[in-house]
Amino acid sequence: MSQMVRRFIRLFAGLFLFAVGIVLTINANLGLSPWDVFHQGITYLTGITMGQASIGVGIILVMLNAVLGESLGWGSLCNMLFIGLFMDLIMLNHFIPLSNGIFSGLIMMFLGMFIIGLASYFYISAGLGSGPRDGLMIALTKKTGRSVRFIRNSIEISALFVGYLLGGFVGAGTLIMSIVLGYIIQFVFKLFRFNVNQIQHRFIDVDLKLLRAKILKKKASQTTGI
């Protein structure tokens, strides 16, 4: 139980930091990341907040991942819900200022990318399942046999293209983040000597099976006692 508590603390620290990093890159005002271009396009189309758009997209992706046979963890569901909630909390209360200059914008964007890298370390190392977007990448990689790089680039280019058509903000920062973010995440992982391949995730279906087995065992012991 104490181990699971520590895992969830690590998970939620990562999700909150992820939201902070995303809002920093948004408020850098130099162009949004591909997924955030898509989320912003949805806000223009529907009138909902960026956080709500992130949650809505996450719900659809989680359902798609389940259809594609990808196992879901409790972290997958928390990622789907809480990053968007934390984003709205930060943005609607103006906790992070909007940059009005290129220099300050670059500082905010690179700081945001570093925090996203740190957040990725925390939430992935919790071992409670991939986020909806990473889960889609993994599921499509398994289904198609194509490389992770090809699948990830294809997904993000598609999100960017649709988001741009919907009016999402594409700028120099979009190109920079598309190229640099992966390297920053890799740098953070090396900094903490973190190997993604060594993580053993706990999935919801496994936990439900264990819970069912415990309930049946308890009922059997009570029947035997009678």
Image (tube, grey):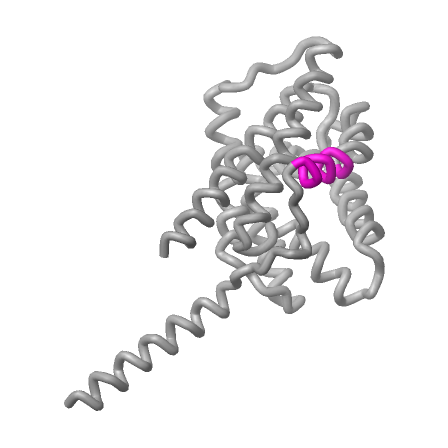
Is residue 60 or residue 30 the one in the foreground? Answer: 30
Q: Position of residue 125 (x, y in %)?
A: 57, 48
In the image, what residue occupies the spot 64% across and 69% down?
69
In the image, what residue occupies the spot 58% across and 40% down?
53
Q: Position of residue 29 (x, y in %)?
A: 69, 19
Image position of 1 (left or right of 200): left
Q: Residue furthest left?
A: 226
Q: Is residue 188 magenta?
A: yes
Q: Position of residue 27 (x, y in %)?
A: 63, 21
Question: Where is the N terminus found, in terms of image quarters?
Answer: bottom left
In the image, what residue occupies the spot 54% across and 19% down?
96
In the image, what residue occupies the spot 59% across and 27% down?
23
Question: Where is the C terminus found, in terms of image quarters?
Answer: bottom left
Q: How many marks?
A: 0
* Vertical order, 129 against 174 (above or below): below
* Vertical order, 173 against 149 (above or below): above
Q: Position of residue 74 (x, y in %)?
A: 49, 56
**Which secondary structure type mostly characterizes the magenta part of the structure?**
helix
* Vertical order, 217 against 82 (above or below): below
Image position of 173 (left or right of 207): right
The answer to whether residue 64 is seen in the rendering is: yes
Q: Is residue 17 magenta?
A: no
The answer to whether residue 47 is seen in the rendering is: no
Q: Residue furthest front?
A: 193
Is residue 17 or residue 7 the one in the foreground? Answer: 7
* Vertical order, 43 against 210 (above or below): above
Image position of 174 (left or right of 4): right
Q: Which residues are magenta?
A: 182-191
